[in-house]
Image (cartoon, rainbow, N blue to C red):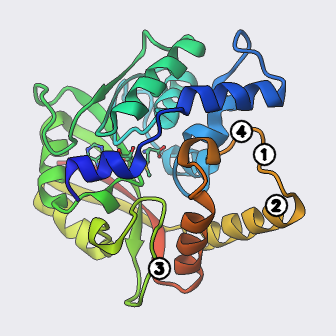
Amino acid sequence: MTDSQVATHYSNTQITENILSGLDKAGISLANVSVDDLGPVDEFHTGGRTATEHLLKDLQFDTHKRVLDIGCGIGGTSRFLADRFNVTVSGIDLTSEYIDAGNKLNEWVSLENRISLQCGDANNISSEGEVFDLAVMLHVGMNIRDKATLFSEVARLLARGGEFAIYDVMLKNEGEIQYPVPWASKSSMSFLEPMERYKQYLEGAGFSIERTVGRGDFAESFFRKMQQTSKASDSPPAIGLHLLIGPSIKEKMRNFSQAVFDGLVEPTEIIARKL
Ligand SMILES: C[S@@+](CC[C@H](N)C(=O)[O-])C[C@H]1O[C@@H](n2cnc3c(N)ncnc32)[C@H](O)[C@@H]1O
C-alpha cells in the first residue's frame, strides 16, 4: 500500500468534531474528559483498551521511560501509556488527520507535554538511534509490505535490551477474506503475514522473541459481544470507533469478524527484545 493509499483509506476530516459530539451525548464536558473516557474511540485495534492492557501487562516500566508508538493513530495507546506508566511517548503515523486529532486530544487531557505525535512513515523515522526503551505497534503491520525494513528501523531506534511489543492481525490459514476490513479497502492494500514470518523478520533485525500469544479466543468473544450489543440497540454507543471509521464500520467489522470466526486471521501479540 502506498503512503497516500493508507492515508486515503483512514481519512476522516471530522474526527475531533465527532468525538466532541459523542462526549456531549455521553454528558462528559471537555473540562472533565479523561484518558479512560476516550478509550472506546481512540484505541483502534481488536478489543480496544482491554487488549492494550493485556499486551503491556508484563513490560518493565521501571526502566522503560521513552516509548515509541508506531502507527499511533489518534494516540489512544500513547495516552494510556503516558497516563498509566508516567512515560514520555513519541508517536508516528502516516495519516495527518489522525495526528492533528491526536495532538488535540492530548491537550484535552493535559498530556501534551509528555506525548508528541508526528506525521511520518514508520519505515523511515528521522531520529537518532538508540533513543527509545520500548516500541509498541498495534494493528499496523497489516498496512506494511516490507516488515523486515520496518523491524530494522525499530531495532536502530531502540536502546540495547529495549522491548518491542506488537499486536497485529496475522494470517492463520489460507482462505478468502472479504474486503473492506478496518485496515484495508481491498486485498491489494493488505499485507497480512503469519506469526512465524514476523518472528523471522524480528530475529533477522536483531531481536530475540520473548513471547507470542494468539488472541483468537479473545477476539471471537469481543466480536460476539459487539454483535449482541448492536442487535440490542439501533444506535451505536455515544463514544465508539464509528466516530473514527465512519459509516463503513459495519461492513468492515463484519468482514473482519467473519475472517476471525473462520480461522483465517488471528490478532496476535509478540514481545521481542533487542539483543
Ligand atoms: C488500525 S490503525 C491502528 C492505530 C493505532 N495503533 C491504534 O491501535 O489505535 C493503523 C494505523 O497505522 C497507520 N500506518 C499504516 N502504515 C503506516 C506507516 N508506514 N507508517 C506510519 N503509520 C502507518 C495508519 O495511518 C493508521 O493510523
What amino acid is at disc 1? Answer: Pro
Q: Nearer the viewer, residue 251 or 155?
A: 251
Residue 115 in the image: x percent, y percent? 41, 19
What amino acid is at disc 4? Answer: Ile
Picture residue at 45% right of the left edge, 73% below the top: 179
Judged left or right of residue 14, residue 177 is: left
Residue on which the image places disc 4: 239
Residue on which the image places disc 2: 229
**Camera sees residue 216:** no
In primary-sequence order, the first of circles 2 and 4 is 2
**Quadrant of res 71:** top left
Residue on which the image places disc 3: 178
Callout 4: SS: loop
Depicted 202 relative to depicted 22: above or below:
below
Picture residue at 38% right of the left edge, 29% below the top: 99
**Quadrant of res 60:** top left
Residue on which the image places disc 1: 237
Q: Are marks 4 and 1 in contact (CB under 8 Å)?
A: yes
What amino acid is at disc 3? Answer: Gln
Q: Could you tell me how far apart the alpha carbons at marks 2 and 1 are, in whole angstroms? A: 9 Å
Callout 3: SS: loop
In primary-sequence order, the first of circles 2 and 1 is 2
Judged left or right of residue 83, residue 231 is: right
